[in-house]
Image: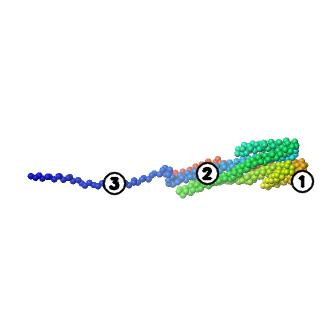
Amino acid sequence: MTQTQSAPPPAAWSPPAQQSAPPAVQQPAAQAPSPRGPIAQWFDGTPGRMRAFLILAAAMSVVFGLAAAQGFRQADGALSRAEANAAQLVRIQAIHTNLVSANADATNAFLVGGLEPPAQREHFVESLNEAARLIADAATAQPADKDALGALNQTLLTYGGLIEQARANNRQGLPIGSQYLRDANAVLQDDSLPLVKALVQANEERVDTEFDGIGQANIWVLVGGLLTLVVFGVTLRWLARRTHRYVNVPIAAGAVLVLLTTVIGGFALANASSNADETRSGSYDRTLALSRARIAAYDARSNESLTLIARGSGDAFDKAYNASAAVVAEQLGKLNDAGLRSQWNDYNDVHKSVRSHDTKGEWDAAVALAVGKTPDANSVLAFTEFDDSSSSRLKTTSSDVSTALTNARNGLPPIGWLGLPIGIAAALLVAWGMSQRLEEYR
């Protein structure tokens, strides 16, 4: 019998497998707004802007105070340095004058022969001693001139030694004495006077620089004041529009303080600058003209004597006399001083007589006029009158320069040391006024 095979039991039903969904695309998470920093928040809104204006106006107030102080310190310092440099310039020119004065005495005394007149010898010694003393004083007063003054002092010693050699030989009637005299004059002209002229130029430039600095000091006060007032004006206008109050009294008071300081300081500095300019074009220029005239006059007198000492071969010295005489006339023309011009013309007329005798071969008559042996008109008397008058005027004008610059300094208000306190006071007024408005927002 055939067995029937049973069919395999049916497989248990299971639900169809679900397909997995594709992964969702991840969206970037929205970034939360970053919080503002504390400094930025402090300047937010109207209160923040008030704080910004407060800082700006207060800072400008302090800057104004510093600028005002700087302006007045600059003016005071420039006036002080101008006075010191002008005094140094007068000192250097006095050295120059004493050197050429001593040389004029030495050359003129050489014409006398033998022992020179005691008064003339004494004046020569005094002139050299005064020049040495002034060199020491000038080196102390202005260290920048110290090296040149040291070199000048060395040439002075050489010059004095050559003059003594010339005197010694001249007393013995030895012709070599005139050579020593010419050598001494060469040392003076080629070594000493170039140093003196360089010192004069350097000190003139220093004085001019300081005079210019006095006028420039006003820029600090005016620019600082105007900028600060602009900031105050903008601050007050902005506050009036935001707070509907026309005037913030403390800030307005600060603006008035700045304005008064600017006006008073500006007028004071302008007045000091005007006084300095007046001194510069007045007594200072007269001092320079007198010094230059006296130096050229002594140089001319030396060349008058050297022309005679050369005995017919002194054309170079005669030309040097004419050049120096032209400088005297030019400088006296700046002074509008009829008395000095008349005295110089008197001396120049005697010099023409000296030259007239010399060119005619009347050497003894020319020398008599030149050394003062003629009783009436002579070179010594005429030159002494000019020398005394010009010396007296020079003392007056140099004193006027110092007095005028000192008065200009004393006339400055004490803003040099009050400037910063004024600026701080204005800044505190700004803080006070702005704090009143900020209180309304708390």
Residue occupying the point 45% across, 51% down: 35
The reply to whether residue 377 is in sight is no
| Amino acid type indicated by mark 2 | Phe
x then y, percent, for residue 238: 55, 56
Q: Mark 1: which secondary structure?
A: loop
Q: Which residue is labeled 1 in the image? A: 360
Residue occupying the point 52% across, 51% down: 439
Q: Earlier in the sequence, mark 2 or mark 1?
A: 2
Residue occupying the point 70% across, 48% down: 81
| Amino acid type indicated by mark 3 | Pro
Looking at the image, is mark 2 or mark 3 nearer the viewer?
3
The reply to whether residue 53 is in sight is yes
Pointers 2 and 3 in contact (CB under 8 A)? Answer: no
x then y, percent, for residue 86: 73, 48
Residue occupying the point 51% across, 52% down: 43
Q: Residue 23 shows which numbered tag?
A: 3
